[in-house]
Image (cartoon, helix red, strand yellow):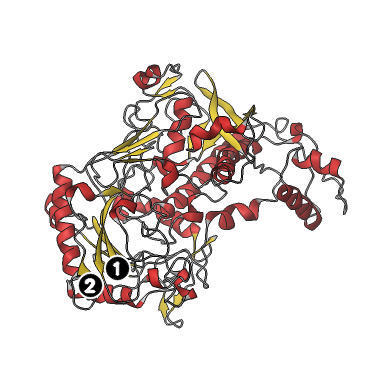
């Protein structure tokens, strides 16, 4: 459930109606989110805290990225990017509508300089964004970049249909995870030999902590939960950019007329290339006069105007995957400027009205403060200056957009388990360890303490790369301290058969393994003679269990998404979970 008391068009709605719902499949939000690749300004990274500034994180962004070394026919550098990472970054979108180029011209006429590199040129500018797209416009996502290449590893176990419900705590130590098999309605336990890593995002990571008795004392007691460990900041300090979709009607062709039937009206010819659009095709950014006066030495932009060559209604603004917010075929022909405030005084929180796993959390975003509204007025004034330029030629649609009660939160939150030193004001330390609890880390966007006008995907991937170094560094320290007698014995690989019996596969990947898991196991065993098949759970190494706990959380998202859209079997046991998915 989402509540926005300061957003009059839609003050309250269900998660089922909006893109704020977690992407419940492997790859998470990178599969369904926009393909834009815009890093936060270095000043924003410097506000994260010790060890997470731009100088520390720059190499981790490069570790993620894969872009050609030269662009523009090989004559110029592509900019400040890594060239050998797993995530392909395109210099520019695969498709750009003609109207988008006119928006760039209009922003230039309003005083901004054009750039072809928004991640390298850090000042006020207008341009098209780099993207996570292949050359044919298809999406680059985290599953293909990171998880798919690891699917054959013997120490990776993905539990499909597993909903993580509670952490197993012993005094101040996290021992593992309790999860529910949603297909069989069985509760099961996975124990960790080293540590548990939570990666469920800004809503469901604090939820799992709360269900485990970790959170604000008075809130836990209010729902009858035992206080296992008091951490008042769990679910608090939620930051989210605020935006309002200002629209202009036009006689020119927009995306709503290019997509073919049944989306577009029958008189318009489909233009397949339009499906390569990033939707938010260009952006203009600047530092407001208000921010410049308050912090004269800071340079980062706090206002972003994003151009969409299509209509977006106020009532559909929070429901980000509803596109125009009207039934097909689309009738309103307009272009939109999303007026976005990157950093606001207004914050939010994730709260929990029950200690039952079946009851959804509540996300609340505060209304704009007086200072936020001053910033919004400056942003709206500049948007009107750009949108009314003759080169665009539209007529402004005065539907209430741009007013104080028409700024919605952008559902890409941060900070609900933010990092910091103070146990009363943060959830994890600067090595992502949950304060006061051993063997428990959080690695996702919930730990990011600083707001931004951009989507957090680049920061989350770079954060995960650094977290991997932190975890591996600790494991190496432990290994170095072991005596030769304590070190793990050398295992001679078993002979790999070219044929597999059902019994062998069951022993290797489990009785209830998915078909694709069996196929991966056979493929890896045939291709790599050094792979040893796992014959029982007792043979799993200690390094396996953090991955199991992580995979249990992620795979829960995959299963429940399929459940939600109607692929689930309709039996009596499964009907018990309807309230969670409503």
Q: Answer left or right for 563 relative to 1.
A: right
Q: Which residue is mark 2?
A: 394
Q: Residues within 10 Å of mark 2 (few under 14, many from 20)?
A: some
Q: Residue at x 47, y 63 (%)?
A: 132
Along the polypeptide, which appears first: circle 2 or circle 1?
1
Between 55 and 396, the residue placed more toward the observer is 396
Q: Residues within 10 Å of mark 1 (few under 14, many from 20)?
A: many
Residue placed farthest to the front in the image? 266
In the rendered image, the vertical position of residue 471 relative to residue 321, given as above or below: above
Residue placed farthest to the left in the image? 293
- Mark yes or no: residue 193 visible: no
Residue 244 on image: x %, y %:
25, 54
> Element type at marker 2?
loop
Confirm or deny contact between disc 2 and disc 1 (CB under 8 A): yes
Between 132 and 411, the residue placed more toward the observer is 411
Q: Answer left or right for 560 relative to 410.
A: right
> Element type at marker 1?
strand
Q: Quadrant of the N terminus?
A: top left
Q: Residue at x 42, y 44 (%)?
A: 445
- Residue 566 position by quadrant: top right
Mark drawn on residue 334: 1
Between 26 and 461, the residue placed more toward the observer is 26
In the rendered image, the vertical position of residue 27 relative to residue 473, given as above or below: below
In the rendered image, the vertical position of residue 274 relative to residue 296, given as above or below: below
Query: Could you give the CA–CA distance between mark 2 and mark 1, rounded to whole angstroms?
Result: 8 Å
- Residue 486 position by quadrant: top right
- Mark yes or no: residue 73 visible: yes
Residue 555 on image: x %, y %:
59, 42
């Amino acid at each position: 459930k989402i509540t926005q008391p300061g957003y009059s068009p839609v003050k309250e709605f269900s998660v089922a109606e909006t893109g704020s719902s977690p992407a419940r499949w492997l790859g998470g939000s990178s599969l369904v989110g926009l393909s834009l690749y815009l890093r936060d300004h270095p000043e924003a990274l410097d506000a994260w805290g010790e060890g997470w500034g731009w100088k520390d994180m720059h190499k981790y962004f490069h570790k993620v990225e894969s872009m050609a070394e030269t662009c523009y026919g090989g004559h110029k550098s592509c900019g400040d990017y890594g060239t050998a990472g797993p995530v392909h970054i395109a210099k520019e979108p695969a498709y750009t509508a003609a109207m988008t180029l006119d928006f760039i011209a209009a922003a230039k006429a309003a005083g901004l300089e054009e750039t072809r590199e928004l991640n390298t040129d850090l000042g006020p500018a207008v341009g098209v964004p780099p993207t996570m797209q292949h050359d044919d416009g298809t999406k680059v996502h985290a599953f293909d970049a990171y998880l798919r290449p690891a699917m054959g590893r013997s120490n990776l176990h993905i539990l499909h249909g597993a909903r993580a419900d509670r952490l197993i705590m012993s005094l101040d130590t996290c021992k593992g995870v309790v999860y529910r098999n949603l297909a069989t309605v069985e509760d099961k336990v996975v124990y960790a030999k080293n540590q548990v890593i939570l990666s469920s995002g800004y809503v469901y990571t604090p939820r799992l902590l709360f269900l485990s008795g970790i959170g604000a004392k008075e809130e836990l007691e209010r729902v009858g939960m035992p206080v296992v460990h008091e951490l008042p900041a769990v679910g608090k300090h939620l930051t989210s950019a605020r935006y309002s979709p200002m629209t202009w009607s036009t006689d020119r062709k927009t995306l709503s007329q290019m997509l073919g039937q049944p989306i577009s009206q029958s008189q318009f010819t489909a233009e397949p290339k339009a499906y390569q659009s990033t939707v938010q095709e260009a952006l203009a950014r600047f530092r407001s006069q208000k921010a410049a006066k308050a912090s004269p030495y800071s340079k980062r932009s706090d206002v972003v105007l994003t151009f969409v060559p299509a209509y977006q209604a106020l009532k559909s603004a929070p429901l980000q995957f509803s596109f125009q917010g009207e039934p097909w075929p689309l009738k309103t022909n307009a272009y939109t400027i999303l007026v976005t405030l990157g950093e606001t005084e207004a914050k939010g929180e994730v709260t929990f009205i029950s200690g039952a796993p079946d009851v959804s959390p509540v996300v609340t975003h505060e209304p704009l403060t007086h200072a936020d509204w001053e910033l919004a007025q400056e942003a709206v004034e500049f948007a009107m200056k750009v949108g009314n330029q003759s080169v665009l030629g539209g007529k402004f649609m005065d539907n209430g957009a741009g007013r104080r009660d028409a700024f919605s939160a952008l559902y890409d939150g941060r900070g609900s388990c933010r990092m910091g030193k103070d146990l009363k004001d943060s959830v994890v330390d600067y090595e992502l360890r949950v304060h006061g609890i051993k063997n428990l880390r959080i690695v996702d966007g919930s730990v990011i303490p600083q707001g931004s006008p951009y989507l957090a995907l680049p920061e989350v991937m770079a954060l995960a790369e650094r977290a991997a170094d932190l975890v591996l560094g600790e494991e190496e320290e432990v290994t170095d301290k072991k005596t030769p007698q304590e070190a793990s014995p050398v295992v001679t690989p078993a002979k790999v058969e070219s044929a597999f019996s059902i019994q062998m596969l069951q022993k290797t990947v489990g009785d209830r393994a998915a078909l694709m898991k069996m196929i991966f196991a056979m493929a890896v065993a045939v291709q790599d003679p050094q792979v040893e098949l796992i014959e029982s759970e007792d043979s799993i190494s200690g390094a396996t269990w953090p991955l199991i706990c992580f995979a249990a959380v992620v795979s829960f998202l995959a299963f429940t998404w399929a459940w939600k859209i109607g692929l689930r079997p309709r039996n009596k046991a499964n009907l018990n979970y309807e309230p969670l998915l409503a």
